[in-house]
Image (cartoon, rainbow, N blue to C red):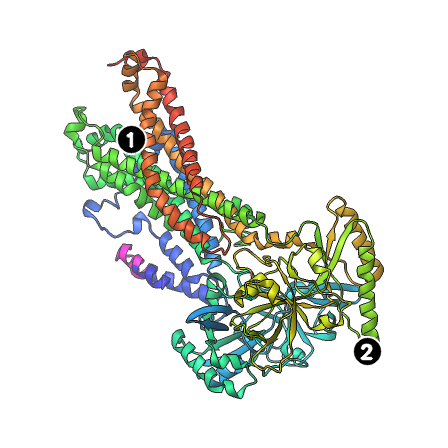
Amino acid sequence: MIKRLADRLFKWFCHPDFYPDIKGDLEELYNDHLEAGSRFTQFRYFLDVMLLFRLSLLRPILKNSLIKDTGMFRNYFKVSIRNLARHKMFTAINIIGLAIGLASFLLMYEYIKFERSYDSFHTDSDKIYRVSYVRVQNGVDADKDAMASRVSAKMLNDGLPEIALHTASKKFDFMLIKNGESSFRETKVISADPNFLKIFDYPIIEGDLETMLSEPLSIVLTESRAKVYFGDSDPIGKTLEVVSPYTASLKVTGVLRDIPDNTHYSFDMLVSDKTLAEGQDYDSWNWNNYYVYLKSDRYIDLADLEVKANDIVNEHINDLDGDEDWRKDGTRLDINPVQDIYLKSDFSYEPQIYGSEKAVNFLIIISIFILVIAWVNYINLSTARAVERAKEVGLRKVIGAFRKQLIIQFLCEAFLVNLIGGVIALMLAELSLPFFNQLVGKEVTVRVIDQLPFLASIGLFVLIGTFASGFYPALVLSDFKPISVLKGKFQNSKKGVTLRKGLVIVQFAASLTLIASTFIIYEQVNYMQGKDIGISIDQVVNVTVPESDAESQEEYDADQNKLIAFKKALANHSAIESVGGASNLPGGELADINSTTTVVRFTDDIEPTEGTTYIQYNDEGFLDAVDMELIAGRNFSESRKSDSVAIMANEAFMRKMNVADYESAIGKKLYFGTKETNRRYTLVGIVKDFNRTTLKEQVEPSLYFPWFEADDLVIELSANNYQDGLDHVRSTWESFYADAPFNYAFIDERFAALYDQDRSFGDTFMTFAILAVFIAILGLYGLASFMSIQKSKEIGVRKVLGATENQIIILFFKDFITLVGIASLAGFPLIYFLMNGWLDNYAYRIDFPWMLLVLSLIVVLVFSLFTVGYQTAKVAKLDPAKTLKYE
């Protein structure tokens, strides 16, 4: 495509006498690059063609061979350079504004391109899909689960002829691995079958694609993890000892290149799926703990594929050991392109925090705003100086210049400004790249100065900028009538003044939108971080005890006694307030909790309701450790044998069950599924809702089961002496679990990490909003400076007639205050539309902050009036005798 475009362009501008020979040389050079396996071969071909755009090679296009008249062109550029040098301040304002605007736009574009590139690096990535479960209630999607059952993958592969491959992968919460005397807690471990690396074709360094994951007890490492465990030695055939969540010796069978950041399902280790076969119910339709992927061998209609997939499920569900609820309610399969997952997912249980398409679209808007503001500056200043350039145009026309020659003259000037701005933009982008990567929290790119696509983008926007910013001023300036100009009767037209005011309004509206949006983003992030989540997480620390690898009941009992003794030793210190344990810690991601889609029922007349129920296991100390409020009933008690079938619920679960009287519900029996013979649990307590994860999500309807052997401990430290408490935890750990690494994390830091992406988005938005406002103020400074100089005689007359400096400044202020007012009328509805939609992404959000819009308006007014006032005051202080000397 790019090569074809370059060929057409070259044939269009090249002189027919030279075309055949040069075209042959270009083709030979292109084939050499192609055989050498060079990347961006077509881009290089396009660049070669552009470098041949020389005056000596051009065909005669316009009359009088205007373009080939090198003497005329030299004159155009000479005059342009002299004119730019004569007006240094305006030139600097234009160049700096364009450079910052273009650098900002292109860096933002690189980030947007990176965010949209997730999972697109795989071969035929547009033919890879993920299968998920959606439960429909009353015709509406009630629960959307990113996971599915392993059996669904094979069923769809067998039943759909367009599907070539299937795979199912399970994500581990963590894996504790020993290598000699060293222990490592790995959090990016997933299971995989041989098809996984055929669908997701990550580069293999060592190992056989067909066999590396075909046998049980096999593990594949990424390059960086292999170096951690084995250094520079060959890891193939060596073993790693898994201590938790199960015990096994895994043989290294392969090494992959490190996984790129732009994937929705990242990992450091692949454990063969057959390793998990023992104890796993692979054929259960209800075992939906897998991420299921399909790869087609052709381009397909996704809606049609979903219909056929659900028909297959409905036909065969009775043959499976599946949930009977599937057959009678609205559960269905949902199939999504893998490239859409990161930005467009609204599913629970995503393997990692996903991005936001709205946030990316917001950044597109701000990047365009920045570039447009920079171009508007050039148009404003160029047309404002029309009177000053009028005599030049008049003289050129008198001595025979055509209008098209004048247009080219002024476009040359615009091209020079944009070209210099483009070169500076390239340097700014390269220098600011480390800061930019840190700002967005990702390594979007390492360098830009030697990347052909980035250089091509610079060149493209220099050309676009030349016409976008220079064409209208060129038309205006070249249209002056020589007789009016040379008689001194020319003055700025009302149309020109109106246009400049309109462009200033656009700048003000854009600046107002960006400032207000930044304020609102930070207000929402601060609200989420400061909101009462229903529990206390200050000075609460987590440590994870190694799981038991006992092979006998005696060894298991000994491990449990050790855990009990460890918890008692922790609590026996004045700096430790309480100790508890849970299966899932507060502050986790969406997937960091257990759940079931099986219906939950009371044994009496309370009607069951469908939907996902979330499940946590914890001991009796957990509620005290996080200050979870018990609003009805009682807590678990290890001393009560009957509590083996006890259960607690949160308020969200009771609302789901339509139970308002909590006290009357205490003591009622619950069971899962539809069979009345299923195990009964006694509801002993109801706890206040708390936000387990990010405030983007509603509080989950949850049930709590007793588990007095919980290995994830939460320890509440004394607020006045937390360091002594932490030291005690460390020393106690070393006395009980000396062989395991001591890793701890504060729960409030876990919650803070959930908002890293929101803070990064806010910081990015704020940084580029500041740059946009700076560029706008820069243009306003130049425009105010020029206008105040133009009106110096008017100011002199007013001072002679008795006007004070303050009165003159206020007179100038009135015009700009009017423009800001009009900009606010246009900007406020836009801000509301954009930001209220963005706030709707959050289950817990602030009310739309109208006062922040007023504050934004004040900020814009202060900046603009200060800029205008500074320039006006300089002229207002001049002695009228000097400004009126020649009148």
Percent of width and height locating residue 864: 39, 31
**Up-down: is 93 above or below 558?**
above
From which residue to which does the magenta span run? 9-21
SS at mark 1 in the image? loop
Q: Residue furthest left?
A: 483
**Up-down: is 880 above or below 154?**
above
**Corner quadrant of residue 677:** bottom right
Rendered residue at 34%/47% (across/down): 463
Percent of width and height locating residue 689: 59, 58
- Residue on which the image places disc 1: 385
User: Given the image, on which type of amino acid does mark 1 rest?
Assistant: Arg
Q: Which mark is residue 322?
A: none
Quadrant in the picture for the C terminus: top left
Percent of width and height locating residue 728: 81, 52
Mark 2 neighbour density, 10 Å: few (under 14) some (14–19) many (20 or more): few
User: Given the image, on which type of amino acid does mark 2 rest?
Assistant: Ser
Quadrant in the picture for the N terminus: bottom left
How many numbered tags mark residues here? 2
- Residue on which the image places disc 2: 552
Rendered residue at 51%/48% (across/down): 524
Percent of width and height locating residue 369: 38, 45
Return the residue nearer the eye: 343 or 611: 611
- Whichever of labels 2 and 1 marks the residue nearer the N terminus, that label is 1
Return the residue nearer the eye: 210 or 640: 640
